[in-house]
Image: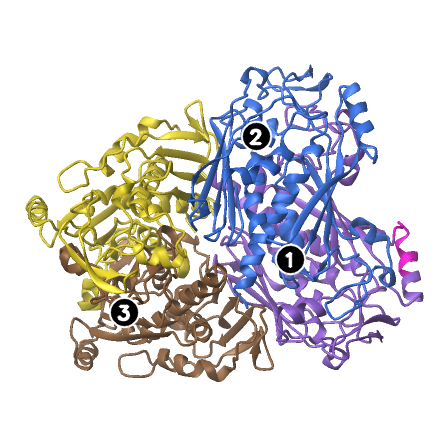
Chain colours: A yellow, B brown, C purple, D blue
Amino acid sequence: MNSFGRLFRVSIFGESHGLYVGVTIDGCPSGVLLNTNDFTPDLQRRKSGAKGTTPRIEADKPEIISGVFNGFTTGSPITILFKNNNTRSEDYNFNKIPRPGHADFVAHKKFRGFNDPRGGGHFSGRLTIGLTTAGVVAKKILQKISVEAKLTQVGGSIDIDNAIDNALKNHDSVGGIVECRVNGLPVGLGDPFFDSIESLISHAVFAIPAIKGIEFGSGFSAASMKGSEHNDRFIDHTGKTATNHAGGINGGISNGNELIFRVAVKPTSSISSAQKTFDFAKNQTTELKIKGRHDACIALRVPVVVEAVTAIVLADLMLISKSYL
Amino acid sequence: MNSFGRLFRVSIFGESHGLYVGVTIDGCPSGVLLNTNDFTPDLQRRKSGAKGTTPRIEADKPEIISGVFNGFTTGSPITILFKNNNTRSEDYNFNKIPRPGHADFVAHKKFRGFNDPRGGGHFSGRLTIGLTTAGVVAKKILQKISVEAKLTQVGGSIDIDNAIDNALKNHDSVGGIVECRVNGLPVGLGDPFFDSIESLISHAVFAIPAIKGIEFGSGFSAASMKGSEHNDRFIDHTGKTATNHAGGINGGISNGNELIFRVAVKPTSSISSAQKTFDFAKNQTTELKIKGRHDACIALRVPVVVEAVTAIVLADLMLISKSYL
Amino acid sequence: MNSFGRLFRVSIFGESHGLYVGVTIDGCPSGVLLNTNDFTPDLQRRKSGAKGTTPRIEADKPEIISGVFNGFTTGSPITILFKNNNTRSEDYNFNKIPRPGHADFVAHKKFRGFNDPRGGGHFSGRLTIGLTTAGVVAKKILQKISVEAKLTQVGGSIDIDNAIDNALKNHDSVGGIVECRVNGLPVGLGDPFFDSIESLISHAVFAIPAIKGIEFGSGFSAASMKGSEHNDRFIDHTGKTATNHAGGINGGISNGNELIFRVAVKPTSSISSAQKTFDFAKNQTTELKIKGRHDACIALRVPVVVEAVTAIVLADLMLISKSYL
Amino acid sequence: MNSFGRLFRVSIFGESHGLYVGVTIDGCPSGVLLNTNDFTPDLQRRKSGAKGTTPRIEADKPEIISGVFNGFTTGSPITILFKNNNTRSEDYNFNKIPRPGHADFVAHKKFRGFNDPRGGGHFSGRLTIGLTTAGVVAKKILQKISVEAKLTQVGGSIDIDNAIDNALKNHDSVGGIVECRVNGLPVGLGDPFFDSIESLISHAVFAIPAIKGIEFGSGFSAASMKGSEHNDRFIDHTGKTATNHAGGINGGISNGNELIFRVAVKPTSSISSAQKTFDFAKNQTTELKIKGRHDACIALRVPVVVEAVTAIVLADLMLISKSYL
């Protein structure tokens, strides 16, 4: 299923080289001011073209085909499309010789050979444009709550520029770390157990291709800490804490402090140097040189998508929270 | 909401010091051999009493009150209860002086003072008995697929025994790392985007209290790797790969290799030494000494719960996968 | 699945002759005053014992095992159990010779012989006690909105007493019509298409065994009417209409007028006179005389259950509606 | 929410006079042969132009923008669009003077004036093209199971032609009865209680505008019957019954006999003769003459939509049923 959310629900559809990719946002309240220009900044951040990103450049012009009237959301489902223009389908056919690290093999098996393999088909990172778009709408619902993600490391280094240069020089790719911080959240979003904020955010974050890990607050370093160090003591009547190892969450619920999490992004699977893989038609090992056009560091384009899925989760929780007051 | 799953759905309910805690498993196929003894091994693994765990010991005797007849599941919802016997409610009242690292503060705010604070109420780790119980049923559906989690580090050390001793000696607590490995999965479980295996497993795993992070395969170390290192090359017609940085997942879908992930468990929030916190009634900083009975290292009891939620997710995906063949 | 609702979700479980039947109510806001006496009036209305109802009488004493503390709901899942005391399992075994009009045949086939056949097992009308119980909680959320259902016809006659007497005299059973009216609803509950009020109420109403039809407002008679007769003209600024053929709903959404619908209840399938059926073991026609204890007119006990499921739907819609203001 | 279904999920979007209306079908298995011509027969049946239907005629040309590749479904979400060409927005503006029987009033209130009122906006019958389209895909999954609906009465008469003529002559509209029959269903689809076949079908059927009632099998006449008449006795080892008052369903589950239900369709709300209504701007009663273009008998176009939503429900149940074998 390609849907997520309880009251604010996002569904994405499309294939990399199909006619359109798109998104439907169901459950957005009526009366939200929305026009196509609102999407420009976040679409621009997601866009390729900069150093380390793929030379495939799409116009990324949103076509709002439903749910908006006279510049405001109507309360009906909002569907937004993006035309795929810049497709070179001759570059791809990996059903027989799947690319290492890609979904070619599993897609072919799961869908019994009927998947659209062109440009990764439905598995393409191109689909994240729908997430980004829905994130823009979600941020409007969040109003004064800020959601900001940025790239903090590439290839294990904070000299990000240099790490990208190295990867490009070596016809290789490189991973990175993205950190997301949310400020202005009220106390009380989320629930213990299955609807914890961590459950919902991680669910949404792992919808982004290439993400391999997520940690909240102190995260993996908490495993090496003592309780006396890790516990965040309360220092005032608002629930502010002296430290923030919890990352703004106790018992699955926002505690009013800054929400912080980090995600690990793997290096782009497509690299231009030759790789060994298996030829499933000839039943033998072979060597593959991927042509196509790819990002040397997909992590460069991930922050805005992390923001988007975080905003989608939080917008849903904000709407839900109103039900109980 | 306290439910999870699409065809195999688990709901948990209860409070630490209420009459019962329990679980309802909806969507379990009929004809699964099931009796109360089946739960013994996993309940035993979750149980306290060993060094580093709380001295509160419960009988943990499952009462199957529906969904099983003549030793087999009937196909109707299975509800299983556990009586709370060993409760000492005088130990707890933290609405005014919330314990650092606990859900006392958020629970009080979110539920406007109506939450049951005794022993953490609904937020208690006691509720994980329902997850463990559902996990036993899920494992039966998985048949030959094995799900095994174990504690690999405590307090940053692999000498786990020593780390626990230190924590106990210092009236402190300590975190740990749990690793889970699944073998025997078919190719094709999961979906790209919102129903990726990572999305579903992380959603379920963060339903376990005290978990701060999760990483699949190479996880956070992927962020420092190059594509040429990270890509797992296929080596035979089954899709076996030479390395397993992907942790058994490509494009959100199981690839038939071992599924591997690790979770970070924070140190238990309750420690017996004095801590600073805030007195919300007197509006001033205060010192708190928690009596009660607690685990010095909750991570000791987490592996079986991680197995359980993983099995719950995979059982659901196995049932779903049959629909499409 | 045995769950229903988006923010206010009700799940039922249990078998007629098992240990308990019960219900879990998830998503009830905290702070609702609730004690076991609150259930008495509606449980009493559902109870058997009167003329035309089964002589099987249960204590129907609710045991609230979670989600209520100090007399108020806590915001956590509320689970309520009812012990099955008065069971006579020797009366039943219909896997081989299924009773006409009952679920014996389909239950045996669907669950491959593993269903609990005692007293109808999970298919028993006994399960509606869970619906009734959840309805009481839902009505509390509805506050001043009144939901009232009553029996308006039995066996085609408004002389209900006489119709029951005839059925009893002839060792037969008889159907009836139940009408439900809701007053005090705000304008705006529901949605066009899949979440129309009619969709949600009919979904919930057909969860009650023995119901064969539902109609809103003018219902089936609308099929014989002209638009000029059927259209309800607005007569004031509140949206009040001169007539109410719409039954209080336009475009799937409450319009502030009285919500009205009627349901058809079939005659109880169990009758004490002999009936022809098929012996699936001997593969031949046979005659069956049902012993057991049954309602001559199950419709007598349906109104309170219709109220309950209606209240469940409306409580959910009321909570959802708050999200959008 | 505008979505329905558990494994086979249909979402509709769009407005009557927007750029497109459309549908997304998520969860369709891969490998289903599908091209735009497959939709022609059902779209043709839904189309207007015949006597008694609106003179607004749309090309109704489906544009499959995702989920189909090389003539087969891929297993990814299928989105299909229909351009709105033939729009005359000057005909409509009913926020101030709402049309009797229409959603104008509730839409304006619920969406706080932000709804798109042109042609009924999102509330338009135009949206049923998405249901019809999804129904075609669902029917392919059902294979040999036939779903057939037809109009059996108009304005209380079986002389349908004459009833339409009368309505047209009087500038009025008229209602009707649609009957749907499903043959070839296996025993065992559906569940007792909330997921009964009746619950699911009625839920989907009431998503069709203008429907006021539904009855299964004997339906409302069951309320006047005796158990000895109503019970369908089994006559062979397949579960065939001598009569079919149950309409093919026992205990919420298909019993292998023909599934039968009927729905009541109200007369079209838009009529060309003058009607009284309320002017909410001037706060006084007024007279309204609706221009626009409308169906004198919308029931004429309903059968194919009833088939569609029925097929959608059954396709979902067929996929679910495979999970349990």
The residue shown at (52%, 24%) is: D17
Crowd class of label 2 (few under 14; some 14 to 19; many from 20; radius 10 Å)? many
Q: Amino acid at mark 1?
A: Ser
In this rendering, position of residue B59 left or right of residue B97: right
Residue D117, disc: none
Residue B268, disc: 3
Mark nearest the camera among 2 and 1 is 1
In this rendering, position of residue D198 left or right of residue B122: right
Mark 2 touching mark 1, by CB under 8 A? no
Q: Quadrant of residue D214?
A: top right
Give me the C-alpha separation between circle 1 and circle 3: 46 Å
Mark nearest the camera among 1 and 3 is 1
The residue shown at (60%, 24%) is: D57
Q: Main secondary structure of the magenta part?
A: helix
Give the labeled residue for mark 2: D107
Helix, strand or loop for disc 2: helix
Give me the C-alpha separation between circle 2 and circle 1: 31 Å
Q: Determine the chain carrying the residue at label 1.
A: D
Give me the C-alpha separation between circle 2 and circle 3: 52 Å
The residue shown at (31%, 52%) is: A255
Q: Determine the chain carrying the residue at label 3.
A: B
Residue C191, can we see it? no
Quick one: label 2 or label 1, which is nearer the N terminus? Answer: 2
Q: Position of residue D126 (x, y in %)?
A: 58, 31
Q: Position of residue C261 (x, y in %)?
A: 73, 44
Crowd class of label 3 (few under 14; some 14 to 19; many from 20; radius 10 Å)? many
Q: Position of residue A109 (x, y in %)?
A: 37, 59
Crowd class of label 1 (few under 14; some 14 to 19; many from 20; radius 10 Å)? many
Q: Position of residue C21 (x, y in %)?
A: 62, 69
Residue A203, can we see it? yes
Give the labeled residue for mark 1: D196
